[in-house]
Amino acid sequence: MNVLIILLRREYWQHRKTFLVLPLVIAALCAFFLLAGLGTAQVIGDKISIDATIETHIQDGSQSERSSQEYSMAPGPMLFSDQLQRFAELPLGQRETALNTLYLSFVAPLLLVLWLVVFMYFLTCLYDERKDRSMLFWKSMPVSDAMTVVAKLLTGLVLVPAIYFVLMMALQVFLLLVSVVAATGLELNLWDTLVAPAHLLQRWGQMLVFMLFVALWCLPFFAWLILVSAWARSVPLVWVIGVPVVLVMAEQLFTDSDLVGSFIGDHSFPGDLTDRLAAGVGPLLANLASLEFLVSLVLAGSMLAAAVYFRSRADEF
């Protein structure tokens, strides 16, 4: 266990700028643009007039009500205040849906960068060691090849997502505080309108479960990246993309099935983040109890074993 911790620390310090500095910069930019937008609206909002027609549709059970109000050259802050008042009158479910979209959209840049960082890390984690010959030094240490591969896998699937997850929580707390401060002074219940429907603790739990789900569900894809990183002599990105493309093309040419293409696409990254989070934890756990997931684990284990083998013989290639 001590050896594994040391290896994880080594990976962190070697990629500190990518693992920590980059997400900090992106989080700071997200916070800056939020404050800049609100600040601009407050400072010059009275000087900017907005000509608009706002329609509000409120549905409660079997009854629905649609109302509209015209704004002719209304000041920006006045329009914001009126819309927030209307938002407070919406049913709880609609407020929760709207805030869910807002909070997910606010941290979406971090989620995108996280996927890209993990992708590039796995693609180069073993290839760069062979390219600059630093692998010879690390192989001289009393650390097995299997332990090295496991450490790199845990770095990409646990350590890096944990750092980004903490920053996403901080960003969402910041968004909540800013929204409450911006709405202070309006005649509405801030707790019922903005705080309670945000469900931050529940949201973080769902995000954590989703990130764990992605780590397990996409394990064949990540294992494939590590295998290519351990085996390819050059341009690993071409191998990562080229081999799946050839498999899909062969499947289309010789069979009427799209099983391989669907499997590769679904296990590369499960899209529809908002829909999957809105559906709750149950469907995610159901996917992990399927035969498809068992097959993916076997494939991932085989590719990781192959990566260990190629790293053990890397000095022969």
Image (tube, rainbow, N blue to C red):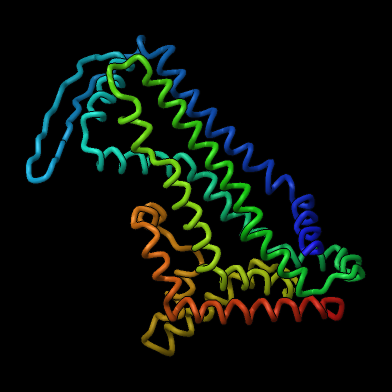
Q: Residue pushed farthest top?
A: 47
Q: Is residue 177 left or right of residue 24?
A: left
Whole-percent x, y for residue 45 in the image = 37, 14
Whole-percent x, y for residue 16 in the image = 74, 47
Which residue is at a point 64% across and 53% down the rendered structure image?
160
Residue closer to the observer: 210 or 71:
210
Whole-percent x, y for residue 211 in the image = 52, 57
Which residue is at a point 62% across and 60% down the rendered structure image?
157
In which image quadrant can residue 144 be found? bottom right
Q: Quadrant of the C terminus?
A: bottom right
Residue closer to the observer: 188 or 227:
188
Q: Say above or below: 124 vs 35.
A: below
Q: Is residue 313 left or right of residue 123?
A: right
Which residue is at a point 43% across and 44% down the rendered structure image?
104
Q: Residue pushed farthest left?
A: 63
Residue closer to the observer: 80 or 197:
197
Q: Say above or below: 105 vs 182.
A: below
Q: Is residue 236 left or right of residue 61?
A: right
Q: How many marks?
A: 0
Q: Is residue 190 left or right of residue 26?
A: left
Q: Residue pushed farthest bottom?
A: 254
Which residue is at a point 62% across and 72% down the rendered structure image?
223
